[in-house]
Image (cartoon, rainbow, N blue to C red):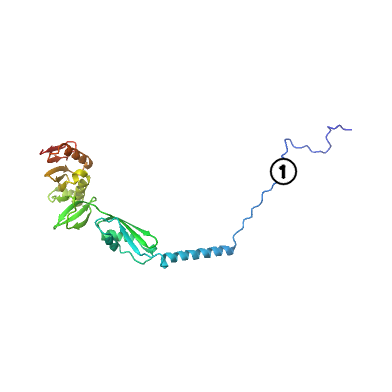
Amino acid sequence: MAGPTTARRGAKKSPSGPRPSPPSGGRRFRLPRLRVRRPRRRSVIIIAVAAVLLGGFGAWVLYGSDWLRLEGVHATGTDVLTPEEVVAAASAPMNAPLASVDTEAVRRRLLARLPRLKSVDVTRSWPHTLGLEVTERTPELLLKTNGKFVEVDGEGVRFATVSRAPKGVPLLEMTVSDSPSLHRFGTGRLLRAAVTVARDLPAAVRKDVRTVRMRSYDSITLELAGDRTVMWGSREQGTEKAKVLAGLMKAARDARHFDISVPSAPAVSGS
């Protein structure tokens, strides 16, 4: 008779290592299968029809209804011009659908009809308004011709002719007809050089400048109130010349003539 430790014949040996413990309750856990339902053909058709109807309604609201029509145009940013002048020059299509207004065409029309305008921003203000935000050109110098004054801005653009000279804007006198500079640089570049000089002037000096006289590209003279003159030279080193001039005028208050054509070696006289 075999002992208690004798293995039974035919009995299979258990695999080495611990057996995994079954889930609680002795039942195996199975993940539920997710069933994805495909949209029915009828639902797809309903959604497509609804989208078409919604899009058509939106297009009708924008272009066909009376709800979003252009009823008013407002201009802001004017100084010399009036808002009424800007609105009239815009010629916006009143009572047209606001969405159909060509804002770029309105902008181009304003710049062409009103040269005083430097920039224009046209925006729709729903539901019924068009906004015109304008920036006017600022005169830096004046050219006198036929008893009137042509305003020239900081870019050398002649943008307006007025019968009365604006206060605080110097007069430009160009006597370059016999100068080689005219043939070398041309009138446009010489004009821009003079404008650059006027723009570089210190504020304390600019208010006293009466005339900017240009004889050539390298010979620009400023005539100030109180019989004072400044030999500026060319437009080069404008920022440095402006600083030197401001310092000289403080140091030599009684001087009448200043030469800063070479800013590293300035000179004063007539004190």
Residue 149 is situated, as x and y percent measured from the top left of the image, at 17, 55
Identify the residue at image location x=55%, y=64%.
Answer: 46
In the rendered structure, the answer to whether residue 91 lies left or right of residue 192 reads: right
Residue 244 position, x and y percent, is: 19, 38
Residue type, mark 1 in image: Ser
Q: Residue at x 51, y 63 (%)?
A: 51
Rendering coords of residue 233 (x, y %) = 16, 43
Residue occupying the far right of the picture? 1
Does residue 195 appear in the picture of this structure? Answer: yes
Q: Looking at the image, which residue sits at the far left?
A: 270
Q: Relative to residue 26, is residue 211 drawn left or right?
A: left
Residue at image mark 1 = 24
Residue placed most toward the observer, 224 or 198: 224
For the point 35% across and 61% down, the residue is: 130
Give the answer, above or below, for where 33 lies relative to 42: above
In terms of depth relative to the viewer, which is nearer, 48 or 189?
48
Between 231 and 149, the residue placed more toward the observer is 149
